[in-house]
Image: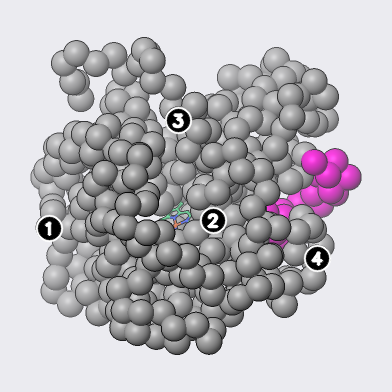
């Protein structure tokens, strides 16, 4: 896998971590704002005006949104996400769909159901065991090996940022020699909100690369996800290349960015409560509830979008046909009607499901994989980094972001192995 003229190992002037940090924005705590909106009205209507939204490269390409209805309660978030007739996912086709192509994310039932059935098998909880040690465990171990002897690290650039995209490269069965280019193009694709043109170019290049891989797997089936997709069959229908590309591209923003951010948030929550970190280290049965609480407390993806297909009354507010509806997952996860003391990271709270993976037909296809990745990561960190603590000299560790949320850095110290 070679591209003339580009040096994949050292891309001068392009720092993916900086891109991601900037993309998150420096909003430290949007939750008081959401609480204020929720207390005021169940559905906030904002007129943006005809000329608003300009400036970024994404805005130049995306259609003008003139009016947004934001849902902040858990009940209404569920209502929107499970009513596919009145709240369509088709709006993604004019935003992220321009980069990914027509993936399941933009489809509505029944088309969505047919396509999702073809790719769902590989992501069922039972199917994931095959990836647990050989792929996820091995990837995390290699990254920790690189700093375990040093006694200090920044866990975002050295662990949580690189691991999910490497896991995807391995799940897809990409040859190791191709990884530097794949990782670079993936990062460019994921940074779509920051640099539209670069993301479009990366998407096109990845399609070309996937074409070679798919052709190879059609000739020689292997034990990897691309082979499974090539062979998947439901009701006599098989996926063509044009259906496989968008799905493979979708895995990068959907599966890599979210998991890097959710893993960072989990570690941040625990590092800020050393007694809870010790409790989890001593009793690994607490790991799953720590993961669920981290996902609820700081969801990596704060808001998802729908389009109203007809005029609809939502929480007493009239939403006209064609309106953009923003479902604030992060706000729904902190709805005081559902969670006591919602702003507190409390791994011992009464278990109550969160909405970080969405709901309805589009509920995250990779949620079992994401949970598994977070579990393997936390277990490895606890096993291999004894005495783990936030670096006392750390400069203002925090979570930030209004669209995506996670800490830009996690400087830590530990007892060297
Ligand atoms: C903590 C990590 C993750 C979070 C918070 C998350 C969140 C979400 C959410 C909210 C949706 C619904 C989007 C919508 O309805 O508009 C979604 C869909 C999706 N996710 Fe995830 N995700 C995570 C990890 C993953 C992983 C690891 C993968 C796979 C490698 C993945 C693959 C997908 C796919 C393919 C969809 C589209 C499903 C559909 O449209 O039917 N996600 N995710």
Q: Please determine whether, in this image, residue 408 is positioned above or below residue 220.
A: above
What is the span of residues highlighted in magenta in the rendered image? 272-294
Q: Which residue is mark 2?
A: 302
Q: Which residue is mark 4?
A: 341
Q: Which residue is mark 3?
A: 19
- Side of 398 relative to 183 (left or right): right
Which label's residue is closer to the chain start, 1 or 2?
A: 1
Mark 1 Cα-neighbour bin, 10 Å: few <14, some 14–19, many ≥20: few
Q: Are marks 2 and 3 in contact (CB under 8 Å)?
A: no
Which label's residue is closer to the chain start, 4 or 3?
A: 3
Magenta region's main secondary structure? helix
Q: Which residue is mark 1?
A: 240
Which label's residue is closer to the chain start, 4 or 2?
A: 2
Of residues 330 and 187, the one nearer the viewer is: 330
Distance from disc 4 to disc 2, alpha carbons, whole Å, reads: 19 Å
Of residues 138 and 206, the one nearer the viewer is: 206
Q: Please determine whether, in this image, residue 48 is positioned above or below residue 392.
A: below
Distance from disc 2 to disc 3, alpha carbons, whole Å, reads: 18 Å
Q: Is residue 392 magenta?
A: no
Q: Quadrant of residue 330?
A: bottom right
Distance from disc 4 to disc 3, alpha carbons, whole Å, reads: 34 Å
Residue at (55, 63) in percent of width and height: 329
Q: Confirm if mark 1 falls within 8 A of ligand 1.
A: no
Q: Secondary structure at mark 1?
A: loop
Of residues 232 and 407, the one nearer the viewer is: 407
């Amino acid at each position: 896998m070679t591209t003339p003229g580009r040096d994949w190992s050292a891309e001068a002037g392009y720092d993916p971590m900086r891109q991601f940090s900037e993309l998150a924005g420096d909003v430290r705590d949007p939750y008081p704002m959401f609480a204020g909106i929720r207390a005021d009205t169940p559905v906030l209507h904002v007129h943006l005006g005809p000329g608003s939204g300009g400036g970024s490269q994404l805005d130049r390409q995306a259609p003008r949104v003139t009016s947004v209805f934001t849902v902040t309660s858990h009940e209404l978030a569920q209502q929107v996400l499970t009513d596919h007739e009145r709240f369509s996912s088709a709006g993604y086709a004019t935003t992220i769909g321009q980069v990914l192509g027509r993936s399941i994310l933009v489809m509505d039932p029944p088309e969505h159901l047919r396509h999702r059935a073809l790719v769902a098998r590989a992501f069922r909880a039972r199917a994931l065991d095959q990836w647990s040690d050989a792929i996820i465990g091995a990837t995390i171990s290699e990254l920790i090996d690189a700093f375990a002897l040093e006694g200090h690290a920044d866990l975002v650039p050295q662990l949580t940022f690189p691991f999910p995209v490497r896991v995807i490269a391995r799940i897809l069965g990409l040859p190791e020699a191709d990884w530097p280019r794949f990782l670079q193009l993936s990062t460019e694709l994921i940074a779509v909100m920051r640099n539209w043109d670069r993301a479009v170019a990366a998407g096109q290049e990845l399609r070309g690369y996937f074409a070679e891989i798919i052709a190879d797997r059609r000739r020689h089936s292997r034990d990897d996800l691309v082979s499974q997709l090539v062979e998947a069959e439901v009701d006599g229908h098989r996926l063509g290349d044009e259906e496989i590309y968008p799905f493979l591209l979708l895995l990068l923003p959907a599966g890599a960015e979210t998991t890097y951010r959710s893993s960072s948030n989990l570690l941040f929550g625990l590092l800020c409560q050393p007694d809870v970190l010790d409790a989890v280290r001593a009793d690994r049965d607490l790991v799953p509830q720590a993961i669920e609480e981290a996902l609820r407390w700081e969801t990596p993806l704060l808001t998802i979008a729908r389009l109203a297909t007809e005029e609809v009354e939502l929480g007493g507010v009239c939403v006209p046909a064609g309106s953009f509806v923003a479902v604030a997952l992060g706000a729904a996860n902190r709805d005081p009607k559902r969670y006591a003391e919602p702003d507190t990271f409390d791994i011992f709270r009464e278990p109550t499901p969160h909405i970080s993976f969405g709901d309805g037909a589009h509920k995250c296809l990779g949620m079992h994989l994401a949970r598994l990745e977070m579990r393997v990561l936390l277990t490895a960190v606890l096993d291999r980094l004894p005495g783990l603590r936030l670096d006392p000299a750390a400069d203002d560790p925090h979570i930030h972001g209004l669209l995506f949320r996670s800490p830009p850095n996690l400087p830590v110290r530990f007892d060297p192995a």
